[in-house]
Amino acid sequence: MKRDYSKLKLAVMTAISFITLFHFNYAIGQLAPNPDFIGGAKSYTYKSEENTSLRLHIFQPH
């Protein structure tokens, strides 16, 4: 008799998804909203295309 593990697989995948989502939301929440306000940070515009710019932030340890 072969067992069906599809419900167990779904439960494990769902749990891993929630743990991953919580971890990344917590990590993103730890970032400052604007790195320009962090002491010692320097910000440079690396590349601009139309309405989008890629900024480079350099943080110096205190």
Image (tube, rainbow, N blue to C red):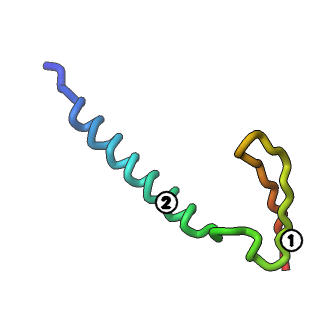
What's the amino acid at mark 2?
A: Asn
Residue 12 is situated, as x and y percent measured from the top left of the image, at: 32, 43
- The 10 Å Cα crowd at callout 1, few under 14, some 14 to 19, many 20 or more, is few
Q: How many marks?
A: 2
* As drawn, 61 above or below 28: below
The quarter of the picture where residue 41 lies is bottom right
In three-dimensional space, the C-alpha distance between marks 1 and 2, rounded to whole angstroms, equals 25 Å
Within 10 Å of the Cα at label 2, are there few (<14), some (14-19), or many (20+) other Cα atoms? few
Q: Nearer the viewer, residue 11 or 32?
A: 32
Which residue is rendered at x = 24% and y = 30% of the image?
6
Q: Residue at x 65, y 70 (%)?
A: 32
SS state under label 2: helix
Q: Is residue 37 above or below residue 15?
A: below
Identify residue for label 2.
Answer: 25
Quadrant assignment, res 52: top right
Residue at horizontal 77 percent and vertical 40 percent from the top = 49
Quadrant of the rendering where the C terminus is positioned? bottom right
Q: From the top left corner, tell me how far across and down residue 17 is, in percent.
A: 39, 46
Determine the secondary structure under disc 1. loop
In the rendered view, does 7 fall on the left or right side of 54? left
Identify the residue at image location x=83%, y=63%: 43
**Mark number, residue 60:** 1
Relative to residue 2, is residue 20 drawn left or right? right
Q: Position of residue 44 (x, y in %)?
A: 86, 58
Check the image and name the residue furthest to the front. Answer: 50
Mark sitting earlier along the chain (1/2): 2
Horizontal relation, residue 11 to residue 51: left or right = left
Residue sitting nearer the eye, 24 or 1 = 24
Badge 1 amino acid: Gln
Q: Position of residue 58 (x, y in %)?
A: 84, 63
